[in-house]
Image (cartoon, rainbow, N blue to C red):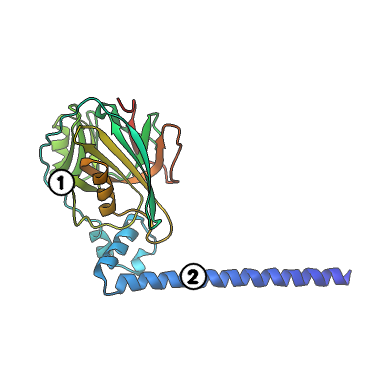
Amino acid sequence: MSKVIKRKKKTGKALLAIALTLALTAVILLGALAGAAFVIAKGPAKSESARLCATFAEKRFPLAGLFFSADELERSTFYMPPALTESDIEPSGAYNSAIYYVDDVSNAWDAVVITGISPDSLSLTETDSAYAGGKYSFGLGGDLDAFLIGDYLTYRGADGEIYCFCAMGDDGVLDIGAMTAYDAANSGYVWGLEADRVLVRDSAPAEDLGGGYASRAAIGQAADGSIILIFANDRGFYPSGITYSELASLMYEYGAVNAAAFRAEGGFYADGIGQLGEKSASSFAITVKGGAK
């Protein structure tokens, strides 16, 4: 009996030693990661510091205050949208939809790109999931400051405040640019919502977009009037996610002449693919009811 007890004690000591070793390794790794983040945050490379600051702000990293001030975190996400201009897009009414899967070579993100969507099949829906009963749909963050669904307008800012607004008219044209909530509600739009950035404008990718690494959703319109949807998931630790500039390049590569980015939430659904990305429940979804023509 004593031999059995001694064997159990030895086993217990061995397991305890392994647990302590694993715990110490985890502490060392976390310390190394924190040290690397501190070097990036306070180092001489201002662009990398700004990127890390924006990433912490966008992902709501709870310890961001250890590396950046509240003012730095707030300014890192500031964006002034360009003035809205009229678009000369004339939807052709004949589209061929296609789904593409894109993997970033740095393994920081993967994306689904859907092209050839009919503008009149698109809608904005309030939902608690990315899936809203459509052919394709992706969830959007619920902390939007302004959105318009039919005649129902919600905005949280002051009267006259300028938003980066993305809106669809009953003519099937996607308008993206600076707009007040009042203008959005009185311009004949079917739906619209606040966007994070203008990615592509007048057939050219936007520059100096700032921001960090995150999961993102995007909508764009091609020269023939068809709609392009992109949902990009983040992978890894850091960098983890897609930048606005990378998303702008991706939209441009797939033919967008105008495009906007949003904060992705709730995952993505398309034709039996199921959910891509485990995100929190969304409050809105951009949904394609009928798919391509």
Residue 161 is tagged as 1
Q: Which residue is mark 2?
A: 29
Could you say which quadrant of the image residue 227 lies in? top left
Q: Nearer the viewer, residue 80 or 110?
A: 110
Image quarter (top left, top right, bottom left or bottom right) of the N terminus: bottom right
Q: Nearer the viewer, residue 1 or 25?
A: 25
Farthest-out residue, right: 1
Q: Residue 206: image x %, image y %?
A: 18, 51
* Above or below for 87 versus 63: above
The residue at 61%/72% (across/down) is 20
Q: Residue at the spot x=36%, y=56% of the render?
A: 60
Mark 1, other Cα within 10 Å: few <14 / some 14–19 / many ≥20? few
Tell me: residue 27, above or below residue 175: below
Q: Quadrant of residue 256?
A: top left
For label 2, count other residues whose C-alpha is less than 10 Å away and answer few (under 14), some (14-19) or many (20+). Answer: few
| Mark pair 2, 1: CA separation | 45 Å
Q: Secondary structure at mark 2?
A: helix
Q: Is residue 245 above or below residue 35?
A: above
Q: Position of residue 140 (x, y in %)?
A: 34, 42
Compared with 187, 178 (above or below) is: below
Say whether residue 273 is left or right of residue 217.
right
Visible residue check, residue 87: yes
**Image x and y of residue 26, in percent:** 53, 68
Q: Nearer the viewer, residue 280 or 267?
A: 267
User: What's the amino acid at mark 2?
Assistant: Leu
Query: Residue 98 sits in which quadrant?
Result: top left
Q: Amino acid at mark 1?
A: Glu
